[in-house]
Amino acid sequence: MSLLLRAVLLSIAIIGTSAHAASDRFYKEKPSSMNGFLADKDPTYLKECGSCHFPYSPGLLPARSWELHLTRLDRHFGETVNLPPASLSAVRKYLTDNAADKSPYDGSIAFMERIKDKTPYRLLDVPTMREMHRIILAVIDRRAKIKVRTLTNCSACHTYADEGSFGIEEMLVPGLSVQRKAEQRPLSR
């Protein structure tokens, strides 16, 4: 592990909870684990949303935030999104039924502890998300060789994001982390 990555992880440990304790809530040791977040497997959501951007787990935001997103599809982060009514209904049901305020997953519960009655629109409006990424955002600002420039593509750094697992030990920041050999565990089987 690079010295800079170690410093980032140590800083994360200092500015809130310990890195290990934080990772415990977000790391899925096996696919059936209730740690982390719901892994996105809904075919309509993956097709309609995941074809343009990383398919964020519904457990990252409360239902009211997903409703807000779906009412603003005409200005969805600079784009206009037109979904067929049946697809929009299916996506709405999937996102709101599995949202953070309804999810039994530990990652969602951790996010909701700080969201409370707020309605975050962006993921960085979620206090836990913002705090967990504060140091890496500062490093991205200062290090041009880091290939990831924003936090919009979770799987760029979180090697098992598509499985709902966001453990610190699974992070691999392109241009910052030392490439590890095949020590990663196969989560999906």
Image (cartoon, rainbow, N blue to C red):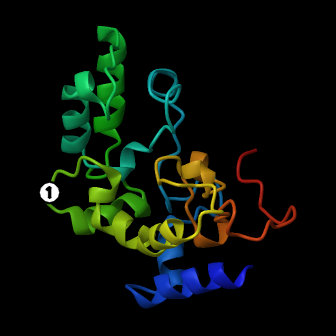
Q: Return the residue nearer the eye: 54 or 134.
A: 134
- Seen at 19% across and 36% down, the residue is 68
Image coordinates of residue 178 in percent, x first then y, are 77, 71
- Seen at 64% across and 78% down, the residue is 5
Residue extending furthest toward the right = 181
- Seen at 63% across and 55% down, the residue is 147
Q: Quadrant of the C terminus?
A: top right
Q: Which residue does the numbered mark 1 point to in the structure image?
A: 118
Query: Is residue 161 depicted above or below 127 in this figure?
Result: above
Image coordinates of residue 134 in percent, x first then y, are 41, 72
Query: Is residue 18 depicted above or below 93 in this figure?
Result: below
Image coordinates of residue 56 in percent, x first then y, are 45, 43
Q: Quadrant of the N terminus?
A: bottom right
Q: Based on the displayed image, in which of its 4 quarters is residue 110 positioned?
A: bottom left
- Seen at 51% across and 28% down, the residue is 46
Give the side of residue 182 with respect to residue 83, left or right: right
Check disc 1 and give the amino acid type.
Lys
Image coordinates of residue 116 in percent, x first then y, are 17, 63
Residue extending furthest toward the bottom = 14
